[in-house]
Image (spheres, grey):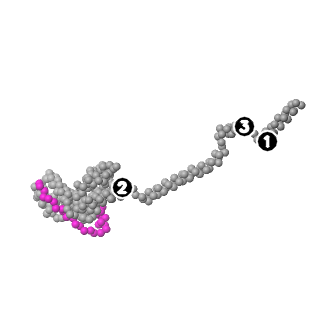
Amino acid sequence: MRSKDGDPAAYLQRLRPLYVELFRMAHAIVGNVELSEYVLRSAIVEAYLRRREWQGRMGFQDGLEHTVRSVALVELRRIRAAGSFELDWALPPCPTPEHPVAQNLWSRFLRESETTQRIALLYYGCGLTNRQIAQVMRMGISEVSGRLRRLCSRLSRGAHLSGQRGRRALESYLEKLMLTALSQPGEEVPEAGAVFRSFERDVDGATRPRLTAGRVLATVIKVVGAVMLAAAFWLLAVLLEPSLSGVLPADTQGTQSQAQLESPAPAGEENSTSSTQNATKIAAHS
């Protein structure tokens, strides 16, 4: 029986509350719904198969998010090298925040360009670095940092958040707003059941022992080695048999000598013995 960490059903149960957020994160990075679904399918399988590597360094959610980011960036480079693809990303509709400051910030954020919104989501929601965002957006690192700096400046002035404390409060608000955006359901989010069934098939195929060429070769070597060892023992026994047959143990020889003494002599030998005894008696009388 598998442990809880190795049970696919338990793994999916823990993943389910994070499903929409993980898809939105992949979509923000690659910018295409179909490619995002592929990234998500690949990431949850990879995170499960390599869970022993990251569980000691980070939590369950952090490990999944890290894997989604890594797979998405790799697939984005691969698909761009293969050719162009359609960008269909847009900021998902979100409910109006309840806090007055958050309402102010969100309303101002919605007035920003789609490029700036995506950069902010990648930075505050997905946890990408400026360098990674520059790769995703195909722009310079300085342009990414400049857009983020100008965004924070405009939002701070509008919400009257000044100074170091105001900057920290602004970043805290932005992180919460971006996470809220990532967790919003929508028609573009693929149905979780289909993704989870695909996961179960992929994991079952990945963990089941496969008959590879290496396994076949190893089996053949083992069989040949066993046959050669048996043949060597048989040949050694054949070579030693003549020399062993000419050597009898001491007790066997003694038994044979006693048997010869106890066995009756042949008739010819008895007559010869009697004649010799008679000749000896005649010579004694004379």
Secondary structure under tag 3 reads: helix
Q: Is residue 235 magenta?
A: no
Q: Name the residue at 27% across, 51% down.
A: 60
Q: Which residue is mark 1?
A: 268
Secondary structure under tag 1 reads: helix
**Quarter that holds the C terminus:** top right
2 or 1: tag closer to the N-terminus: 2
Q: Position of residue 96 (x, y in %)?
A: 12, 58
Q: Position of residue 15 (x, y in %)?
A: 26, 54
Magenta span dominant secondary structure: loop
Q: Position of residue 227 (x, y in %)?
A: 53, 54
Q: Position of residue 84 (x, y in %)?
A: 28, 69
Residue type (three-letter) at the residue carrying disc 1? Gly
Rendering quarter of residue 176 = bottom left
Using a 10 Å C-alpha cutoff, classify the residue at mark 1 as few (fewer than 14 neighbours), some (14 to 19) or many (20 or more).
few
3 or 1: tag closer to the N-terminus: 3
The alpha-carbon separation of the residues under discs 3 and 2 comes to 78 Å
Using a 10 Å C-alpha cutoff, classify the residue at mark 3 as few (fewer than 14 neighbours), some (14 to 19) or many (20 or more).
few
Asked whether residue 60 is in view, the answer is yes
Q: Which residue is mark 3?
A: 261
Asked whether residue 62 is in view, the answer is no
Segment colored magenta: 73-99
Residue type (three-letter) at the residue carrying disc 3? Leu
Q: Is residue 251 left or right of residue 123?
A: right
The alpha-carbon separation of the residues under discs 2 and 1 comes to 88 Å
Rendering quarter of residue 179 = bottom left
Secondary structure under tag 2 reads: helix
Q: Which residue is mark 2?
A: 207
Residue placed most toward the observer, 90 or 199: 199
Residue placed most toward the observer, 268 or 190: 268
